[in-house]
């Protein structure tokens, strides 16, 4: 037999944005779709929350279990619509597979192994399946250890901010900077944000970590100004989870008041996909933030499938062109055309354009010739500490 451990990806967003009654309706749809992939002799049960367990009887081959898992992924990924909601809802799931007797010969071990394989599927990007392997036995322990270390990191002061300069094309001056989170563990190991941010989102730590980043960036920027350096806006990334919370505007107001930073020197970067998760709520939140005087930038523009109608309604100051469009811009006519169109569109709407991920002089010259306002990337400046960045700001005479 084989056990499939199925977990709906980011189900919390559905509950939080649309309500638990919609979440319950969605879970019933998931259950129905799971049953449609199985024989009458197979079993499916809701383990709890958004987790389901499937027992495949007399299907002990890895190939057959994998085929069932693939069928489930395809079925769950099909869009569904509920009444009184204008958009189709898309969801995915992650699946872990354990097979008896090769992987285990008792119930508890099979479930534990399938669960470990499911978490590996999530770690590898979600919307896929993974078979249990022997090395995953230790991954459960490693995962628990990293969760514990991540929880302690904030309390122990292990997080730090680096700042990547934004260069004004016309003057060549540093006219802004983006605050980027770094984690130096107690033993001196530097952990990439790509490794710990997904885990922080999964276990709910992204909110307190995001609040720390917001306050630290405001405090540092105000300290630069107090020391007599030319004031610049500093950008802080806001996660989709923070955007969906009712207290975001309050937290931003609190950070400005406690640090004494003038609102126009704080810019919040929000990804296009995060804004599109609940358009009406996003519009309301952005309007309240703009009323404070805070600058708003749409990050990764071009990847979130927003329409021009939505863009017109968003109260934003800046568009950041995603680095995937900057790459090969001098040789890829498609990328070059998209970038030119975004620059023209932004300027028509009175918005500033930032190109991120600029790494070569050819890319810089290409963007400069087409009227891009600001450049951010390794070519003009890598992320540096606060003390290193401040040396690039001339003191006010």
Image (tube, rainbow, N blue to C red):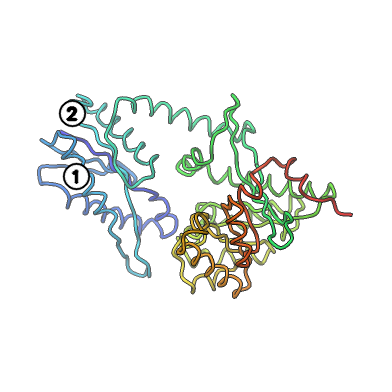
**What x and y, as percent, mark residue 52?**
27, 43
User: Local crowd at mark 2 within 10 Å, few (<14), some, or many (≥20)?
Assistant: some
Quadrant assignment for the C terminus:
bottom right
Residue 91 appears left or right of 158 = left
User: Local crowd at mark 1 within 10 Å, few (<14), some, or many (≥20)?
Assistant: some
| Front in this rendered view, residue 330 or 291 | 330
Q: On screen, 355 above or below 196? A: below
- What residue lies at 50% left-to-right and 30% top-to-bottom? 148
Q: Are marks 2 and 1 in contact (CB under 8 Å)?
A: no
Which element is circle 2 on?
Answer: loop
- What residue lies at 36% left-to-right and 37% top-to-bottom? 119
| Front in this rendered view, residue 339 or 279 | 339
Residue 17's quadrant in the figure?
A: bottom left
Identify the residue under disc 2: 100
**What x and y, as percent, mark residue 197?**
51, 42
Residue 270 appears left or right of 215 = left
Real-space Cα separation, disc 2 to disc 1, in angstroms? 16 Å
- What residue lies at 83% left-to-right and 49% top-to-bottom? 226
Which element is circle 1 on?
Answer: helix
| Front in this rendered view, residue 71 or 50 | 71
**Count of all numbered marks drawn on residues in the image:** 2
Quadrant assignment for the N terminus:
top left
| Front in this rendered view, residue 391 or 224 | 391
| Of callouts 2 and 1, the N-terminal one | 1
Q: On screen, 339 above or below 395? A: below
Residue 190 appears left or right of 195 = right
Residue 125's quadrant in the figure?
A: top left
- Kindly identify which numbered label has been placed on residue 78: none
**What x and y, as percent, mark residue 58?**
10, 35
**What x and y, as percent, mark residue 339?**
53, 64
Identify the residue under disc 1: 68
Q: On screen, 86 above or below 79? A: below
């Amino acid at each position: 037999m084989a056990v499939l451990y199925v977990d709906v990806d980011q189900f919390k967003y559905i509950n939080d944005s649309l309500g638990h009654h919609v979440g319950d309706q969605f879970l019933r749809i998931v259950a129905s779709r799971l049953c449609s992939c199985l024989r009458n002799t197979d079993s499916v049960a809701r383990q709890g929350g958004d987790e389901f367990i499937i027992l495949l009887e007399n299907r002990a081959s890895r190939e057959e279990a994998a085929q069932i898992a693939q069928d489930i992924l395809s079925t769950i990924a099909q869009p569904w619509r509920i009444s009184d909601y204008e958009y189709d809802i898309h969801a995915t799931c992650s699946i872990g597979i354990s097979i008896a007797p090769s992987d285990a010969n008792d119930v508890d071990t099979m479930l534990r192994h399938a669960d470990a394989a499911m978490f590996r599927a999530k770690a590898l990007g979600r919307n896929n399946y993974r078979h249990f392997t022997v090395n995953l036995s230790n991954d459960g322990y490693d995962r628990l250890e990293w969760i514990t270390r991540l929880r302690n990191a904030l309390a122990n002061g292990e997080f730090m901010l680096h700042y990547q300069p934004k260069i004004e094309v016309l003057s060549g001056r540093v006219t802004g900077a983006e605050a980027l989170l770094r984690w130096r563990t107690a033993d001196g190991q530097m952990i990439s944000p790509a490794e710990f941010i997904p885990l922080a989102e999964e276990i709910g730590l992204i909110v307190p970590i995001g609040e720390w980043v917001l306050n630290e960036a405001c405090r540092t920027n105000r300290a630069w100004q107090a020391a007599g350096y030319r004031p610049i806006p500093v950008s802080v990334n806001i996660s989709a989870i923070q955007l969906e919370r009712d207290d975001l505007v309050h937290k931003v107001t609190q950070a400005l008041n406690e640090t004494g930073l003038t609102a126009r020197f704080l810019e919040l970067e929000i990804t296009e996909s995060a804004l599109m998760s609940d358009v009406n709520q996003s519009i309301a939140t952005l309007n309240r933030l703009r009323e404070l005087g805070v600058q708003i930038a749409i990050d990764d523009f071009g990847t979130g499938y927003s329409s021009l109608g939505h863009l017109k309604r968003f109260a934003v100051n800046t568009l950041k062109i995603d680095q995937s469009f900057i790459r090969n811009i001098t040789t890829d006519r498609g990328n070059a055309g998209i970038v030119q169109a975004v620059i023209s569109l932004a300027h028509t709407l009175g918005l500033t354009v930032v190109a991120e991920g600029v790494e070569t002089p050819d890319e810089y010259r290409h963007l400069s010739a087409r009227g891009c306002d600001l450049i951010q990337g390794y070519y003009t400046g890598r992320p540096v500490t606060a003390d290193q960045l401040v040396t690039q700001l001339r003191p006010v005479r």
